[in-house]
Amino acid sequence: MADTRPRPPAAQAPAGSAGDGPELQTTEHGVQVHEVAETSTEREFTVVRRSQTQMIIRRFMAHKLAVGSLIVFVLVVIVSLVGGRFWKYGYADITDEFSSPPSLEHPMGTDDIGHDSFAQVLRGAQKSVQVALMVAILATTIGAVIGALAGYYRGWIDSALMRFTDLVLTIPSIAILAVLAATVTEQAGNWFFIGLVLALLQWTYIARVVRGTFLSLREKEFVEAARALGASDARIMFRHLLPNATGSIIVNATITVAVAILIETALSYLGLGIRPPDTSLGLLISTGQQAATTRPWLFYFPGLIIVIIALTINFIGDGLRDAFDPTQTRVRA
Amino acid sequence: MLSFIIRRLLIAIPLVLLSSVLVFLLVANSGDPLADLKGRNPPVPESTIEARERQLGLDKPLPTRYVTWLGNFVQGDMGKSIRGVEVRPLLWQRLKVTLRMVVLASIIAVILAIGAGVLSAVKQYTPTDYTFTFLGFLFLSMPVFWLAALLKEYGAIRLNALFGEQVVYTVGAETPNLTGSLGTKLADWAGHLILPTVALALISFAAWSRYQRATMLDVLGSDYIRLARAKGLSRSRVMTRHALRNALIPLVTVVAIDIGAVFGGAVITEKVFAWQGMGALLVQGVETSDVNILLAWLMVTSVLVILFNLIADVLYAVLDPRIRYG
């Protein structure tokens, strides 16, 4: 492993000192690291102490595709969130060039009315990214809390919460969204509302994952030890159990971003999501498709942006999964 | 086994009931079914609106409306749509159209996923594996309607030009008023099915092939495979008889559980190809705030989802004898 690298004694850090980083967790792994570090002065090879987080970041950084994806994703997100302010055309501006193919003036061409496509794609991406990020944060929080409660308390709380999860899973989310989007007409087309509804439907998977982790971890000795020391339920859940589920939670949160982007665009494509005069990537594809043969650029670019966002997210998720759980990728005999 | 199925069905009943209450509350409070009538110009007399209100049962309190609806639904009567069409035959007809696409696409996707997944696992970290992995990620990240529209706008024209005649169709589920033998009808169906099915299958294939690869790798690394090789069985025999058979089990459950998602994908794909299926019915129901259509739609699909979840559990137990349901 990378953490047993020989170092000259001069460079050796004072092992076991108090300032060993804030990330010292009471995971099984963490305890091990701690012990190794404390006995390291007596060993021939000194051991550099790394917190769990540092090791995870190192493993992630070794994953070139994931790091590249992360850079591209962050760039796309930043450009989509703030780019609209700096681009010379607004998404509703009408220029005097209509139906012009991509050029230096209009990098993604213009539509038949004269809207600058690049400005529209920027605006659409902004809405889609806003929805996706909101869904990921909200759904992860809800899912983690419900899964934690179910897995920790078991019994009737578990049954009730899991039946509720089943209930949410039963109803096809596209239908619920369609109905809800039509319900609150003054809210319809509002990205915040769409994100909220999506989040209320997307937390189930994370809840199941967290519940599974909690069910197995709550029987471990370190939980018993914490309880013997008088830790409260809340402390055991948030300080001892939740950090151990961080890996699966983060991985699933990234996947949720990709799923949310795809659902939001599909909904807008059906005409039930974000509505005109505002725009979203799905809506742009839907209008662009009508002229796909004559003005293909209107149809290509929004779709490409969706694919880029979702693809990079999926690669990041894959890299994170490897970083959090290196045993999964080990080549087997 | 039988007691397990019965127990699961018993749990499913309150689940369906509860979801029907939720759906009813949601739908009954959504939109105004009379908006069309009220918004007419010149204005419709107040008495007509009230008559329509009574006819649709909107004047009664919500619980009464729910019980009436449930009573009828249990007896197989799904009521009439706002336009006065019986919902049940309408729904069945639309469901058949959509299921045709869902079933065919699922079969294609499963076959593709098994092939790609197994090949990826056997040739792990080779160009073959990387190609399939990349394709898997690509389709996983692609909106189904965009892929469908790509196939429609660019694939169809090329393909038809290649054959010199219209082989694949891009609009509708079948040619209306087509006369001729069964053969022409089937050919017509197939021509309409190809593009939407391929789009849907490719999207579903992505996740399943990744899953198949992971389980196959898992099986290949297990001791009994090494033992089978060590005792002298040929590589191909070990692969097909020992590894593949065991690696297929988890996929069965995943496919059965994912049927709901495939259905959702079909609803969107339909829109691209202008099929008159469940998707169009849903949009129609939403746009006209049609309680009966929406309720029937949601009930049928949620029963389908629950059913397939049950099938997944049962199949799992049948295929993997280590799993026993007490």
Image (cartoon, coloured by chain):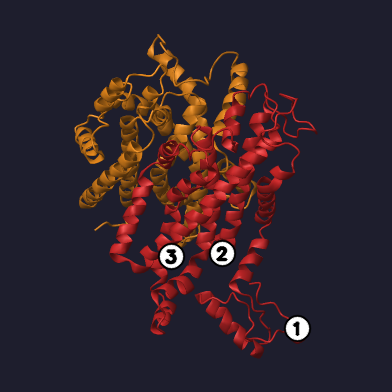
Element at label 1: helix
- Report if the CB atoms under discs 2 and 1 are less than 8 Å apart: no
> Mark 1 is on which residue type?
Ala
How many residues crowd around disc 3 within 10 Å: few (fewer than 14), some, or many (20 or more)? some
On the rendered image, what quadrant is the N terminus of chain A found in? Answer: bottom right
Chain letter tied to orange = B
Q: Please, which residue is most extreme toward the bottom here?
A: A42
How many residues crowd around disc 1 within 10 Å: few (fewer than 14), some, or many (20 or more)? few
Q: Is residue A121 above or below residue A329?
A: above
Badge 2 is on which residue?
A324
Q: How many labels, in total? A: 3
Q: Earlier in the sequence, mark 3 or mark 2?
A: 3
- The answer to whether marks 2 and 1 sit on the same chain is yes
Q: Is residue B324 above or below residue A104?
A: below
Q: Earlier in the sequence, mark 1 or mark 3?
A: 1
- Report if the CB atoms under discs 3 and 2 are less than 8 Å apart: no
Which residue is at 41% across, 67% downward?
A: A214
Report, in whole angstroms, how far the alpha carbon at label 3 lies from the one at label 2: 14 Å
Q: In the image, residue B17 lies at what x, y percent?
A: 26, 44
Q: Chain of mark 3?
A: A
Comparing B24 with B172, the one in front is B24
- The answer to whether marks 1 and 3 sit on the same chain is yes
Q: In the image, residue A100 lies at what x, y percent?
A: 74, 25
Q: Earlier in the sequence, mark 2 or mark 1?
A: 1
Report, in whole angstroms, how far the alpha carbon at label 1 lies from the one at label 3: 39 Å
Badge 3 is on which residue?
A213
Element at label 3: helix
Badge 1 is on which residue?
A11
Residue A62, located in which quarter of the rendered image? Answer: bottom right
